[in-house]
Amino acid sequence: MVRETYKLINTIKKMYPVIEFLHNRYFPDGKVYYSEKALIETKKKGRKAAPFVVPVVGGIIMENEGYRADEFEAPYIAPKKLITAQDLEKKAFGESPESGRTPEQRENEVQAEHMDDLRASILRRLELMCSEIIISGKVLMKHYATAEDAAKGVNYSLKYLQFYDKEFGNYYVWGKDTGKKFGSMNASEKIEELYRMASELRKRGVRATDMVMTSDVSLKFMADNEFLEFYNKRRVEIGDIDPKELPDGVVCNGRININGTVMTMFTYEEEYEDLDGTVKPIFPKGTIAFLHPNLGETVYAQVTFVQGSSFKSYAEKIIPRLVADEKLNTVEVQEFSRPVPYPHDWESWLITNIYDEPAAGADDGGITTFGMEPQENEAETFSGEQQEGTEIKTEAEINAMNRKTDVIAYGESLGMPGLTEDMRLDELKQAVLNYQEEEFGE
């Protein structure tokens, strides 16, 4: 049985890759820091034009706008599995009852299976972190002490990885200018809405190349004959992308030209199993995201733990470890990772949801200046109770919310459990109103 950590690290690197579309395409791996903290550098793209100057001046200094560099204490992801003597005495999956294999011979195989399962769970969490940044501009990281607390969603230390100051400005309200829902729009109106999204990004100096949709949105577009006719059925084709080369859970629907902006359409329908055992989509139903490859990257911090009689640090993306307990007659297979995904330009993408309620003529407040808010990185303990300082909203204010994530965040700030993206927007609002009335009489 291989026990040396440095050898296990090399073993992990040689295992088959896990499919991570969002991570690999939009937040690829970057540096690994020999520190408990990771350096994050973000920069808003400038659009200033250079000034004319008189020859004797020699030049005018232009202000470096929108640049931020922050050190962030990286989160811990540390799943583990147990190997017991009883596990090794049983025959392995697919093993013949007459194989005659000993527990010692099965040990390496079980160890490898556990290492691969743990590695996949870490990479799945990283994929979810990338998704949360795209959807809401921040990652809420709940650090648990026990598996029981994790399953119940209580008694956790909460940290934020946030990429805006006051308001997330990368969310586009579908139909905000027309007041029309997606289902009531014809093909031309839908395309005009997509053009408005592309145009807003161009004003920020960003050229989106990918239009990533959930399967329900993709089906609505691909089953709309008027939409297909608009682009000419002969041109709605895969183009130069081979579907066989795409990862599982991702389909390329072809390329479209939105008034000069050529975009590749992807259908993304990957799912994950949450800590409470429920299966959820990584992107909520109804999602459309305007993205471009390498819009960010993922950096890592080192992991430090006791090895023998002293502490040792490892600066790697995933660090495996074996801990034997002779008293309990068990071996723990552990894996550690401290990833921090972040965008290079905090205004370089847009996200929308076709099921949100549009408000005709509504002003979204303009484009906000993004960045990480350092005070949000401080940990706080949350046990399912109302967060201190939460302001109770009126019924009108709750009904005015047009995003599921906002309603869920407000409900959780009141200490309300059980809110999920699978619920309809009106159901979420009513549930929060009922809870608020019962608990606070509001």
Image (cartoon, rainbow, N blue to C red):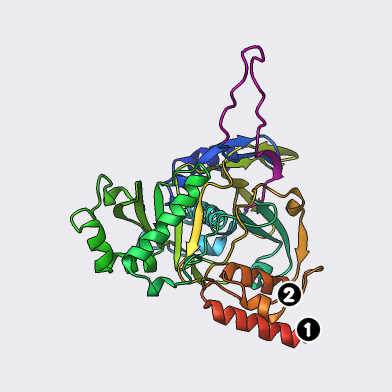
The secondary element bearing badge 1 is classed as: helix
Count of marks, rendered view? 2
- Which of the pair 22/304 is nearer the observer? 22
Task: Specify whether residue 241 is painted magenta.
Answer: no
- Which of the pair 126/311 is nearer the observer? 126
Decide if residue 385 is in sight here: yes
- Which of the pair 105/93 is nearer the observer? 93
Q: Position of residue 115 (x, y in %)?
A: 51, 51
The secondary element bearing badge 2 is classed as: loop
The correct choice, above or below, for 385 with respect to 134 in the image is: below
Q: What are the residue bounds of the magenta stretch?
A: 48-77
Residue reaching furthest to the top: 56
List the residue tagged with mark 1.
Answer: 440
Q: Name the residue type under label 1.
A: Phe
Left or right of 441? Residue 43 is: left
> Badge 2: how crowded within 10 Å, few (<14), some, or many (20+)?
many
Disc 1 vs disc 2: Cβ atoms closer than 8 Å? yes
Q: CA distance from mark 1 to mark 2?
A: 9 Å
